[in-house]
Image (spheres, helix red, strand yellow):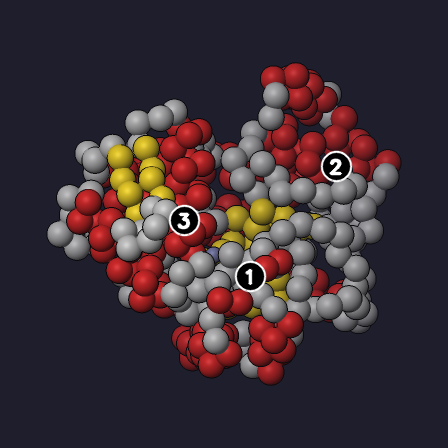
Amino acid sequence: MNAFNFIRNALLFRMGVFSAMRKLAPRSFPIILAYHTLDPPDFLKSILGIRYDSLDFEQQIRYLSSHHPIISMDEFLRWFSGGGSIPENAVMVTFDDGYRDIIDIALPLFRELSIPATVFLTTGCIGTGKSLWTNILYNMLYHSNCKNISLFSGKDTPLNLDLCGSTEEIASGVRKLTGALKRMDDRFRNDELKSLAKQLGFSGLPDPHESLPMLSWEQVKMLSENHFTMGSHSVCHPILSECDLERQSSEIADSRKAIEANCGTSCRVFAYPNGQPEDFTEETQRLVELSGYEAAFAFFPGVIHPGRNRYSIYRHPVFDVPLATFAAALTKRKWHAIR
Ligand SMILES: [Zn+2]
């Protein structure tokens, strides 16, 4: 964002213009926000150039709760199926992956404000002490003294990453590297990660579970008893469109079984790992439906119309933004990710 927009948003925000605009021209469709970790550890801040922290999250949620009706997944599904209404300017809050900071930061805040939320769990990381491979990668890059790495050793065009550049250059290089690794078969990716660990001076793959812990099943149960709806985000977080149908089916069905067995309630909703249009196919959506889910959510924004495809519902990723930018984004009629 340029300096002019930043200052303009800050001024308009202080004058209360954004909330007034939403009252004058209310939205009839809800917005579904998608968060990840609420208090990123240093390795994520440094490697991905994130400035966001738990204070930003708290400010955003307090702002939402005083200016918007916040609806639950039940209310949303009822409205989407034509069986109920929702207030104008409604917002639903969701969290992906299942980081433990939901217990430390979101639970007390949401309890205090009496508002609901939904968590999409990557079940293979719940209660196992295992981190997502992306976080293992970022953690290795942060803790290594090696400043230049080369990946895909067996390929003609290896991917080089220079860790001496500016924060923006490093973050952009790391995102490129992660994007390439995400599309690889699990076995090849694991080999590449091990080869990278060697280059970076590690004897194994250092798991950042201590600095970025995931939820335990006891904590998941506690959330589910406190107005948090539990949904699935697969078992291992693969890009489903890159998997064969058998693997897709087990990722979708087994995660649901694990959530139901541990929470004792029905798991009705799914969120696609990575969630971009190319990350799930019509076959994927059919498998989600066959597994018994009532709806599935993407990770890109758009206007939600009730009755449309219930297995590809838009969400609005929330990235690294000050409160004024967040408030300005909520006012827009056409939506982009909030960054
Ligand atoms: Zn995810």
User: Could you tell me if the residues under marks 2 and 3 are in contact, i.e. CB atoms within 8 Å?
Assistant: no
Q: Amino acid at mark 1?
A: Asp
- Is residue 214 depicted above or below 322 in this figure? below
Residue at the left extreme of this rendering: 203
- The answer to whether one can see residue 296 in this image is yes
Q: Amino acid at mark 2?
A: Thr
Q: Amino acid at mark 3?
A: Thr
Question: Which residue is depicted at the point 35% across and 26% down?
Answer: 165
Question: Which residue is depicted at the point 39% across and 54% down?
Answer: 181
Mark closer to the chain start, 2 or 3:
3
Q: Residues within 10 Å of mark 2 (few under 14, many from 20)?
A: many
- Is residue 257 depicted above or below 33 in this figure? below
Residue beneath disc 1: 279
Residue 142 in picture, x, y percent from top left: 28, 38
Q: Secondary structure at mark 2?
A: helix
Residue 196 in picture, x, y percent from top left: 24, 49
Residue beneath disc 2: 331
Q: Residues within 10 Å of mark 1 (few under 14, many from 20)?
A: some
Q: Secondary structure at mark 1?
A: helix
- The answer to whether one can see residue 103 in this image is no
- Is residue 195 depicted above or below 199 in this figure? below
Label 2 vs label 1: CA separation? 29 Å
Mark closer to the chain start, 1 or 3:
3
Question: Which residue is depicted at the point 33% across and 53% down?
Answer: 155
User: Could you tell me if the residues under marks 2 and 1 are in contact, i.e. CB atoms within 8 Å?
Assistant: no
Q: Nearer the viewer, residue 45 or 257?
A: 45
Quadrant housing the C terminus: top right
Count of numbered circles on the image: 3
Residue 178 is labelled as: 3
Label 2 vs label 3: CA separation? 32 Å
Residue at the front extreme of this rendering: 156
Mark closer to the chain start, 2 or 1:
1
